[in-house]
Image (cartoon, coloured by chain):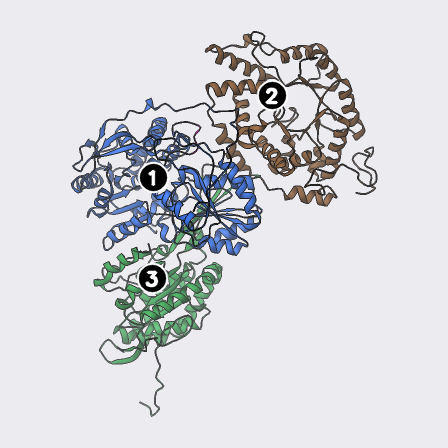
Chain colours: A brown, B blue, C green
Amino acid sequence: MIGMTNLLDPHAPATSPRTVDEPPAPYGDVTRSDAAFRAFLHGLPGVDQVGAEARTTVLASRSIKTTAKAWAIDTAISMVDLTTLEGADTPGTVRSLAAKARRPDPGDATCPQVAAVCVYGDLAGVAREALAGTGIHVAAVATAFPSGRASREVKLADVKDAVANGADEIDMVIDRGAFLTGRYLDVYEEVVAVREACGDAHLKVILETGELVTLDNVRRASWLAMLAGADFVKTSTGKVSPAATLPVCLVMLEAVRDFRAATGRQIGVKPAGGIRTTKDAVRHLVLVHETAGPDWLSPDWFRFGASSLLNDLLLQRQKLRTGHYSGPDHVTVD
Amino acid sequence: MTSTTRTDPTPPSPFQYAPAPESRSIVDIAPSYGLFVDGEFVDGTGEAFKSVNPATEEVLTEVAAGSEADVDRAVKAARRAFTRVWGPLRPADRGKYLFRIARILQERAREFAVLESLDNGKPIRESRDVDVPLAAAHFFYHAGWADKLDWAGLGPGPRPLGVAGQVIPWNFPLLMLAWKVAPAMATGNTVVLKPAETTPLTALLFAEVCRQADLPPGVVNIVTGAGDTGRAVVEHDDVDKVAFTGSTEVGRSIARAVAGTRKKLTLELGGKAANIVFDDAPIDQAVEGIVQGIFFNQGHVCCAGSRLLVQESVHDEVVASLQRRIGTLRIGDPLDKNTDIGAINSAEQLARIRELSEVGEAEGASRWQPACDLPARGYWFPPTVFTDVSPAHRIARDEIFGPVLSVLTFRTPDEAVAKANNTTYGLSAGIWTEKGSRILKIADQLRAGVVWANTFNKFDPTSPFGGYKQSGYGREGGRHGLAAYLKGAAE
Amino acid sequence: MSDRLAVRKTYKLYVNGAFPRSESGRSYEVTDAKGHFLANAAWASRKDARDAVVAARGAFAKWSGATAYNRGQVLYRVAEVMEGRAPQFTEEVAAGEGLSTSRARAAVDAAIDRWVWYAGWTDKLAAVLGGANPVAGPYFDFSLPEPTGVVAVLAPQQSSLLGLASVLAPVLAGGNTAVVVTSRERPLPAVTLGEVLATSDVPAGVVNLLTGDAAELGPWLAEHADVDAIDLTGAPVRLRLELERSAAGTVKRVVRAPETEPDWAADPGLSRLTPFLETKTVWHPMGV
């Protein structure tokens, strides 16, 4: 690739020889060439889909009751990246969401606040202002979300704009087209570039697993993102189906677990899209607990990208507190 | 000498699963049980024995022991039913009775699951998700065969043998009953079944199901008791067929006992399966498969993957992953829905597991067990991994029938096959590799009746199960399993 | 009677592709049905049986690993060579069993036809006895017949060639290797069959023929830990129970002896194939 123009993205700053940050030890040399990187990613242990699904089925049958359920619900609430990613979003809808993030249950001060509010980059400033002093993070999707089909320059500009607007977390998408055609080093390089553009903002790398299709690809893409400096690996944009599934999350949790064991660096995981019920959330927490381990059971290391999930968590929380079932009028509409 | 190592206790997780016990109120255990003969519960003439909950040592009930005379009554009832009712019955109607039984088992699934876990000590998750649904599936599957035997490929006009005497073990009490009773009934035989001494209760509940299904009296007879009762069943002159699942030692004595008779015999005996992990295996699933292979049902599984053969280049990685995974296993109350490993079935079995584990250490293998709290009462043994095991060690050769894994290594496929086959058993084996052609080659070379590739301990009524060598003969399940109960059958 | 002095044949064992004398040095007189001397045959000892088992075990991997087509061709070749020896077999069967030449020839023809029938089975067994099992889950699951291993055959005492072919050919067709104790009184067709086998592409050790006494050798074979199955057809009545009991010690597959020798001309179906076949079931997940 030395000195070659990127055919798909002629404006990409990938001029002569690649000068990208080295991955952490002991993987310093795996990105030395396309061939080496491909060999590394394809040398990762395969994932047997049936076995992975069987494992999550067993874990999904865990029975989480009473005190454990109460803990899980509060923990899940504190892990929510409360998200709105609609073309119709306005400063008003974002402020409304921010209010909900600060005080998910207006009737109960003991209810924890969520981890972050996730918006498009142009609204990050609105969110930042509305959340000032709360400790709630502002996450912005960037890099031509959700398709990622734009030039490198545009993507980086998108990221810088979101950070300038006040986002302290950037949710980028990888170039799935490049990944699926085997141009792993291009994808890697782009993540590194975005990482640099983020400055102090945390970087979540969206793999869009629904387009990667196989669990082998999920594992490879997770490793690619981690090696490139991601702080989080995230399943999906929420715009593609299937989005977050338990087997996908399992494979990503295995990846972050193995990555920390090898490099000492802990990476977070964020399933996003399709997690709507408390039961779904609790199943994910069980998965975290029994795969990556308790160290990941905090909003610093595990997030839910969701919108409607929060209300279901609140309804279940009310049920546990009052002993009777609640109804939709007892939680706020977003 | 002790080389036992335990992982350091990790700080308690913030996520403590609260107890989630399945209610035992769904089962109603009577203070005592008789035998089920000719459609009635009758007193046994042997000395009654107690059935104990192995998780608590609580006595659950008292069960009649069948004497020779009781067995004789049961065989006579079975013979009468065979000649007068079950034999002449339209095959389609025979099938309908089996369908009924399958449905009732499904309807009463929770009751069976709870009772099985109480009596056996196995986790409710397994009795609920494996034993009981599979038992129902066996009846449902075989029900369909009843009027299709001419198309089973076993030769023209296959006919039932008559009275089947069946002796089953304690590791899967209801499921083993289903494996025996369903094909026998579907092929037109009648049954005298002896459940294991320590786990008779689900068989007795099954007797109730037979009544609920209006099954003609005498088609299924259940005679509880210990070894003597089993011997009386096996040796009874009017039994045409003997089917046994259990230890190789008892299997040999049964083969001796039926020698020189007309009785047709099938044996499903012990095993010491090799679970072979190649360096290109899907490691996370392989680790799950190893865990499932040896810790499923506390390792009380004849086809358990009790010998892990791991390629030297990934030995350390696999063992480390395995230990980490074992650390997440939840051991305790079998009725808790989150329990992964329940109680050892009996004090006797616990003593054997302990003894062989001590031999393992004495012979120089390294024992590893996770830090775990075991209940104070009941029979418990933590999941255990032995490394530095050589093929000459007893823990690499003897069936332990408990949650104890012996780890050996290999370097080449030939060495893996040679070590895997280096046993007098031949029931099952596992292969883990992403390379398809290697799977088929190794599967071809393994002398074992069931080979699980990239999976382990999977069972299905359509899939024949049974051993090579001293793991027994005959198959259970599938088209092949029918042959064991038919005359003039090709197998 | 011509003046020429006949060249008499020395009757030996057939073990591991060679024709040794009994290691014991023993031989016994074989007579025709009327009691006239025919030949001295080797009288196999327990050590010959032991050597034969070693040979059969050694040959198992290659024979069971050969393609079914190849096994079929080899067995058919045996029938071809038998056909060429038909007059010799006829003479031996007639003398040993006391049959007219035409009835002896009919028995020989039937034996050859039986052998051909089994030669044609080798590559059908997997399709007829195996299959895919539709398990309730994302797995491909199939079952295949495989040979049991080393089979000890106590050949019929009466039917010296048709009976022998009827019990031996199915063992071989399934891919097993065999240690055969021939009819004690009528061993000569078996000896000739050994010569046929030696010249018809059957690998050494696949068939081992011991002339001698089933009563003497049977117990050793029934107890032998490296014998996987035993056919008691030619076992003496008084020993049958004991042999079956002995076989139980290593969980051998046992084919019991019929009360009297069956009509070997009858269609055997699969009854002599399946007792020496195991069913192997293989599971594999189906995923992407």
* Residue B253: in magenta span: no
User: Residue B171's image quarter?
Assistant: top left
Q: Which residue is mark 2?
A: A79
How far is mark 3 from mark 2, CA to CA?
68 Å
Q: Callout 1, which amino acid?
A: Met
Badge 1 vs badge 2, beta-carbon distance below 8 Å? no
Residue C2, by quadrant, is bottom left
Foreground pick, A270 / C183: A270
Question: Residue A159, position in %: x, y?
Answer: 76, 24
Disc 1 is placed on an element classified as: helix
Amino acid under disc 2: Met
Instruction: Tell which subunit mark 1 falls on.
Output: B
Q: Which region of the structure is painted magenta?
A: B336-341
Q: Amino acid at mark 3?
A: His
**In the picture shown, does residue B84 fall above or below B421?**
above
Question: Can you tell which mark lies on residue B176?
Answer: 1
Mark 1 neighbour density, 10 Å: few (under 14) some (14–19) many (20 or more): many
Marks 1 and 2, how far apart at CA? 47 Å
Q: Where does residue B53 sit, x and y in percent of width and height?
A: 31, 31
Q: Residue at x 38, y 76 (%)?
A: C20
Judged by depth in the image, the label closer to the viewer, 3 or 1, is 3
Q: Which mark is residue C224?
A: 3
Q: Is residue C134 visible?
A: no
Number of other residues with Cα within 10 Å of mark 2, as a class: few under 14, some 14 to 19, many 20 or more: many
- Comparing C281 with C33, the one in front is C281
Spot occupied by residue B12 in the image (x, y as percentages of width and height): 51, 27
Residue B61 placement, left or right of C174: left
